Image: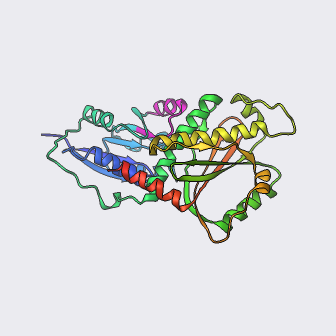
Amino acid sequence: MIKNINILICDDSVLVHKSITRSLQSCCNATFFYAENGKEGLDCLKNVDIDIMFLDLTMPVMDGFSVMKSLPVREFNTTIIVLSADIQLTARERSLALGADYFLSKPFNHEELTELSQHLGLVFDSSQFITPDNHLISEPIESIRELANIALGRGAAIISDHLGDFIKMPLPNVAFMKSNDLSMAIADIRNDNELIAITQRFVGGGIHGEALVELHGKDIHLFGEKLGFSQTDEYKNEVVIDIANLMVSSFLVALSEQITIPFSVRQPIVLEEYMNLHHTYGDSNTFFTIEYTYKAEVLDVECEVLFIMDNHSLAVINKKVMESLH
């Protein structure tokens, strides 16, 4: 008799729930459970004998690291497969030290996932088809959020490799912003003397937008030095501009890999200079935005990034996402 295997997918992305379920849909001895944050995941583990848990590291309410620190919640041996966009070497090492059995990066390889699942006792039958639950239907905005999450993980790994410090992975905020709200936010930034803001334009494949980067903390220049940037003129913000350029380009490179659209970026410029050269935003437009914050674990540095795109750019990204799902 084939043993039934309970699988918990603990991830804040419904798109990931759907993708893993599709990959394992021909498994004839699996029952699927879903959690959208670490707390829901722990509640499921307390009440159900979960054989395999796919665990994301970056989630609201409770992240994957906190989940592993809280285990065990009962006497049952659960195999933990960390499935994360955070591909920093430190993230992998910490996950394995906290009890993870395997570490897979996003976007995951379907064949690798299938082989690992077979190794763990899942039996596949091509004649069987499991229909995903209704809650697995994802909205386009959810797909873009997951794209952004993966891009952030790639960017954090690039920065961490250069820096030699762990970068705390953010949860991306994907939303729409009215132009008057954007103008108010920019005005607040310009009035804050404790931060430096840089803006940079980017274009590619019908997508065009601007990235706004804000840097806080007393270790900004030390952060820049560790990244290999130097200051030649004390009256200019060369290091800050170089850091902002790295933050923007690392994200766009990773996004480009996923939607197969190459981006080109213009020279970054200090926000104050930029606003003196270019127009302000009109009151009638709505923009699509991706917002996140990188924080160094050791150094006192915080970097907030806001990507601003128009609705046409959103339509291009949506089209690319839909093509990748079929």
Q: Nearer the viewer, residue 247 or 112?
A: 247
Nearest the viewer among 9 and 249 is 249
Residue 87 counted in the magenta span: yes
Residue 117 is a magenta residue? no
Q: Which residues are magenta?
A: 82-99
Residue 79 quadrant: top left
Snapshot quadrant of residue 134: bottom left
Q: Residue at x 28, y 55 (%)?
A: 132
* Nearer-the-camera pick, 104 or 250: 250
Q: Quadrant of residue 159?
A: top right
Residue 216: percent from left, percent from top: 74, 45
Q: Residue at x 71, y 36 (%)?
A: 299
In-image side of 158 versus 259 (left or right): right
Q: Is 133 on the left-hand or right-hand side of 41?
A: left
Q: Is residue 190 above or below residue 106?
A: below
- Residue 4 shows up from this direction: yes
Task: Report the residue at 24% width, 55% height from top.
Answer: 131
